[in-house]
Image (cartoon, grey):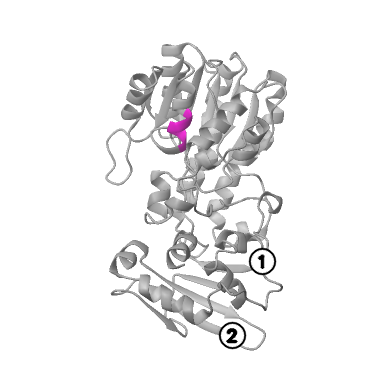
Amino acid sequence: MLNTGKFAGLTAVITGASRGIGKEIALKLAKDGANIVVAAKTVAPHPKLPGTIYSAVEEIEKQVGGRGLACAVDVRDEESVENAVKSTVEKFGRIDILINNASAISLTGTLETSMKHFDLMHKINTRGTFLVSQKCIPYLKKGKNPHILNISPPLVMEKHWFANHLAYTIAKYGMSMCVLGMHEELRPFGIAVNSLWPRTAIWTAAMDMLSSGMGQKGCRKAEIMADAAYSILSRNSDEYTGNFAIDDEILSEEGIRDFDKYAVDSNSKLTLDFFLPKDKFSVKANKRKNDEELNDNSMDIEQVLINARKLINSEIVRKVNAIYQFHLKSETDDLHLYFDLKNGDGTIREGIADQSDVQFELNINDFQKLFNNDISAAEAFMSERLKIKGNMSKAIQLDNLLQKIK
């Protein structure tokens, strides 16, 4: 999406902008001449996550010619947020845009979620969004076409988005509930409040860590979120408010039709993101006459396992470090097998493992469709053809692992 210069002279506060989606949005707005406040915790280089508030501001000023302010901010701390807002107004004199991007994630079940992680997610995601918004609102009231944009999902009340990572879902939905309440509360002041969420996984340093470096090909680049945010923030704040937007839908409204440019690998099947409503994803049309009939190009279970065993090695084991248990159901018999990608050089065996990190249950024909690339694991899960229990951080690697095995 082309820059038009409409944000020149406006000031945007962006939490979590030292890297990833937040930084891409910052660079997009800075190209227009916006003042960018990089409000994040990272002041020194992280051993695994690149970027600091200072390196982000350096990119803003040297690469795109914008003006930046590095603010060391912990969104859990009220004084820290107040100081950042004060510094912003002292330097730029205004706040026109707030983007609540900072977030914490732990894809664990109820028994596996420590209260430390529960509190961390809620303090950063829900409380942090509320707190930063609260402190910026007095200045947004005076802003030009003021917007609050939360990087949070649509409020889809479907059980599969709660069952496997309840604490994270509640915390993330808390950000979206801020949209639901604040957009109406702030309507009299002309402050728009919306959310933006990606249809697919976005390749960032955080996603790299979450997928153990295996998920890149199925992702889109963060630029798609930056372009979508640019579109939303360009809209009339009196009119466009209270929306739960999906990135490529927003860009389709702008006339964009070529989405391959946003893909990390345009030849790979995209991995759908969490929290999409059922009408926002589609299962690839079944090429077979029926679910019991495989076409000539399909692999049977035995061939799938042969191909998988050829791929598995100590490097895969090092990256994945998990045991996957599969329960494959059919009309005549059930098959249990497991991928041990935690021990030695890895192995695949029939039977039930003594312990497993993730448990999958699906129809045996759907299992074959996954390997035949007729459906993705995300599509199967969202259509309730695939049931998942256990460590969801490990489960999200399934699509990537299957694509390597094909």
**Quarter of the view holding residue 180:** top right
What secondary structure predominates along the stretch shown in magenta?
Answer: helix
Query: Which residue is more in the foreground, 277 or 138?
Result: 277
Q: Is residue 340 visible?
A: yes
Residue furthest out toward the bottom: 332
Q: Residues within 10 Å of mark 2 (few under 14, many from 20)?
A: few
Which residue is rendered at x = 37% and y = 35% of the image? 41
Residue 51: where, in percent of width, then height? 33, 35
Residue type at mark 2 is Asp
In this picture, residue 11 sits left or right of residue 148: left
Q: On the image, which quarter does residue 376 sit in?
A: bottom right
201 in relation to 377, above or below: above
Question: Is the residue 360 above or below the residue 394 in the image?
Answer: below
Q: Nearer the viewer, residue 347 or 209?
A: 347
Q: What residue would you read off at disc 1?
A: 287
Q: Earlier in the sequence, mark 2 or mark 1?
A: 1
Q: Residues within 10 Å of mark 1 (few under 14, many from 20)?
A: few
Q: Is residue 320 left or right of residue 149?
A: left
Q: Secondary structure at mark 2?
A: loop
Please tell me which residue lies in front, 129 or 352.
352
Magenta-colored span: 21-25
The label number, if any, that marks residue 334 in the structure image: 2
Q: State the image coordinates of residue 237 (x, y, percent, origin top left).
A: 67, 22
Q: Amino acid at mark 1?
A: Lys
Q: Is residue 258 above or below residue 314?
A: above
In the rendered structure, does residue 111 fall within the stretch colored magenta? no
Q: Is residue 127 above or below residue 190?
A: below
Q: Identify the residue at horizontal 48%, vertical 26% (top origin).
A: 28
> Residue extending furthest front?
296
In three-dimensional space, the C-alpha distance between marks 2 and 1, rounded to whole angstroms, equals: 24 Å
Q: Residue at x 58, y 50 (%)?
A: 170
